Image (cartoon, helix red, strand yellow):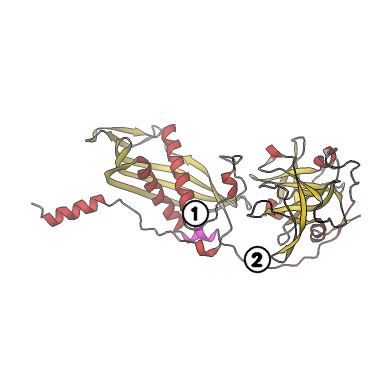
Amino acid sequence: MKSLTSLLAAALLAAVPLAHAATPINVSAEGLTKTAQLKNWRVTIQPPFKIGTVSRGLFCNGATDMTYNKTYDQYLTRRMVEVFQERSTALGYPRYAADDSAFASPTASNGADYRVGFSLNAMSNNICVTAPEMSGTSSVTLKVELFSNQLQKVVYSRAIDASYSSDSKIKENQFYDNLMTNVVNQLFADPAYVDAFRDKAPVPVTVALEPLAVKNGAKPKENVKTNSKGLLSAVVTVENAGVSGSGFYIGRDGYVISNQHVVGDAKFVRIRMLGGYSVPGEVLRTDTARDVALIKTDIEPPVPMFVRQTIAKTGDEVYAIGSPFGAALSSTVTRGVFSGVRKFDEQTYIQSDVAINPGNSGGPLVDADGGLIGIAARKADAAGIGLFIPIGEALQKLGLNLQ
C-alpha cells in the first residue's frame, strides 16, 4: 500500500503541466530593429489524418479516433499566430506596424525583414473534452523556417518536438496556447534564431560612382490641383518579393529612383506602372546610409519628373504621391505643407505634415506646381510628421548629373 507522502507527491506531480526546459532569450535591452511576420502554416500529416484519440463528457468515456480537419487546422493556426506575436513582443522583438493595418495581407509579406513559417509534420493527442474545457496530453513535431525577404532564401531552419499535458480540466484555448508556447519557447531560446535579428556592423566601403547624365523633365504646364495626370504617370510601385514601396522616373532613359530599404539586397525588382502592367527593373546603385536606390528599366517613361532646383519655403503647399500598402492604392495623393529642414542621425531631411504610410517609401514629394523636391523616407512615431530625403542629396549619392 502506498504511503500518504507518496500519494501526495504523485498528486502534485500530476497537477504540474509538462513543460520544456528551453529558456527564451530576452532581447528587450538590445534595441533590435528587424521584424518578422508569421505568414506560413503548412500541414504535412498524411491521410487518413489520424492524430490520436478524444474522449468526451465528465468521466471521459468512449474514446474515439481524432482526425485533423480544416476546422481544427484553422483553430491551431489562430492559436499559434496569437502566441507567436505575444511571445515575440514580450521578449523584446519589434512588432511590424503594417500587421495592424486593415490593408495588411493575411498571406503575403507586408514588408517585414523576415517571414516565419511552420510545418506541422506530426501530432499525437490523448485528450478529454468537456466543452469549453479539456485535459490530457498533446504532442507535436514541427519544422520552423525563417525566410529573408531581402536575400530571398531561408536563413534558419530547425525541427521542434514539443508537448503539453494537464490532468486537470482547463480552458481549451489555454491548453493549446500552452502547447504553442512550448513550441515557440524553443525557437526563441535558440541563439541561431536570435542572431538573425541582430544587426551586424557593416564594413564601410567607398566606391567612386561613374557619373550618369539625366535630363530634367519639363516643368508641368498646370499645377497639381488642376491636372496631375502627367505627374501620376511618372510614379510607380516597386515590388520586391512581397515587399512593396514607391518610386518615380527621372530622365528619359528608364531610370527609377526609390529607397534602398525597398529594394534591399535584390538585384532585380518589378516596376508596376499606373495602368497596372509591370516591367522588370535592375537595381544599379544603392546608398544605404542615405537610403536611396537607382533602378534601370528598358522603357521610356511617359513623363519624367521635373526636378525643382530651388529650396522650398516653410508653409509652401506640398504633395506626396505613392502606393501606401501596395499597388491596390497606387497613385494616392496627399497634401500638406513644407514644415522645414531637419537633421537626424547626421542626415538632412525635409519635414512635412503630408500623410504617408508603409508603401509610400521611395515616392516623390512635390510642390504645388509638380516640382520634385524630396523622396519619402520614413514616418515619425508622432502624428503629422513625415521625413523626406532632399532630391539634391539623392541625386548626388546616386551619381546622377541633372542636365
On the image, the x and y values in percent for residue 84 come to: 47, 49
Location of residue 72 in the rendering, given as x and y in whole percent from the top left corner: 41, 35
Look at label 2 and name its amino acid. Pro
Between 144 and 260, the one lying in front of the other is 260
Q: Is residue 218 left or right of residue 73?
A: right
Q: Amino acid at mark 1?
A: Thr
**Rendered image quadrant of residue 67:** top left
Provide residue 142's location: percent of width, then percent of height: 43, 46
The span shown in magenta is: 189-217
Label 2 neighbour load within 10 Å: few <14, some 14-19, many 20+: few
Left/right placement of residue 163 relative to residue 313 reads left
Q: Is residue 45 above or below residue 93?
A: above
Contact between marks 1 and 2 (CB within 8 A): the answer is no
Q: Which mark is residue 89?
A: 1
Label 2 residue SS = loop
Q: 39 and 375: which one is in front?
A: 375
Q: Nearer the viewer, mark 1 or mark 2?
A: 1
Magenta stretch contains residue 349: no
- Disc 1 packing (10 Å; few <14; some 14–19; many ≥20): some
The residue located at (70%, 68%) in the rendering is 204
Closest to the observer, 208 or 354: 354
Up the image or down, 66 lies above or below 305; here it is: above
Looking at the rendered image, the quarter that the C terminus falls into is: bottom right
3 displayed left or right of 319: left
Number of numbered discs visible in the structure rendering: 2
Q: Is residue 288 in sight in this rendering?
A: yes
Name the quadrant containing residue 303.
top right
Helix, strand or loop for disc 1: helix
> Is residue 30 positioned above or below 113 on the image?
below
Residue 187 image position (x, y, % from top left):
45, 54
Find disc 2 in the rendering and name its residue: 202
